[in-house]
Image (cartoon, helix red, strand yellow):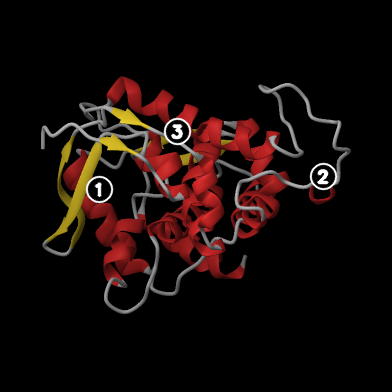
Amino acid sequence: RRTPYIRVPTTLMGYVDASVGAKSGVNFLGKKNKLGCYLPPALALLDRSFLASLDARQLSNGAAEIVKMAVVKDRELLGLLEQHGPALIEHKFQTIPAAATGEASDGVEAVGEVVGVGEAAPSRVLFLAIHTMLQELAPNLWEDSLERLVDFGHVFSMELEMEVLHTEKLFHGEAVAVDMAFCTVLAYVRGQISAEYRDRLLATMRGLGLPVYHPKFDEAMVEEALYERVKFSSGQKIPLPTAEGESRLFNDISMDQCREALALWPTL
């Protein structure tokens, strides 16, 4: 605490998520990240050439946090992930060969628009992931407000991570993806999104090599997660998708709705 430091992320998770925030945390009494402190780095140095050293699972792990930002607030980012997700993982967020994009190599548009070839798509995806995260975190860096869209995928996943901590190697991003998949189905059950959009989101996560279901994500886990959420966040304040690249916080999620989503989820 209070020790100035420079952050140089070498994983995709660190690049798009941890490098942007101010928090550090440790597990305590069987709960995920219950102790920690807030201290932003004096400097964060981002070099995506580090990502070329990662295996596919580590890249998928970090991609979950990119999906999170796409779903909650950026339609352009979501479109890029839908179109280029598998190629981004295959080519490790480095230059994508033109043949992998299905577009002419001279068809790159200006940065700021949806682009799809060569250097442009990976750079744009990483930029948007960090930019949207900063938009959400900067006004509330010390979390004076607990109404956070960036909690999408982080309501139920903490319980799942602790449940399997000693029995299997489940990465944080994989647990987040399972949480996002469930919340996507829950949003559909509640009538907030269409079946078509639900299936698109699940397909996008699958295209990035992410799990979209876990057998230990059950009713008891959901009930415990909701209890913990209300206790520590002074209400549910659960982010759910409402439209393409849009989301809202909700405080009226019932266990009946969760049970319906849990029943439908494995069939999708």
Question: Marks 2 and 1, how far apart in space?
Answer: 45 Å
Q: Earlier in the sequence, mark 3 or mark 1?
A: 1
Task: Tell me if 161 is positioned left or right of 96 in this view.
Answer: left
Across and down, in percent, residue 175 comes to: 41, 60
Q: Secondary structure at mark 3?
A: strand
Task: Tell me if 187 is positioned left or right of 80 in this view.
Answer: left
In the rendered image, which quarter contains the C terminus? bottom right
Q: Residue at x 78, y 47 (%)?
A: 97
Q: Amino acid at mark 1?
A: Arg
Q: Secondary structure at mark 2?
A: helix
Q: Amino acid at mark 3?
A: Arg
Q: Which residue is mark 3?
A: 248
Residue 201 showing in the rendered view: yes
Mark 1: few, some, or many residues within 10 Å (few <14, many ≥20)?
some
190 and 179: which one is in front? Answer: 179
Across and down, in percent, residue 187 comes to: 51, 47
Q: Amino acid at mark 2?
A: Ala
- Mark toward the viewer: 2 or 1: 2
Q: Which residue is mark 1?
A: 229
Q: Return the mark for residue 98.
A: 2
Residue 240 to residue 202: above or below: above
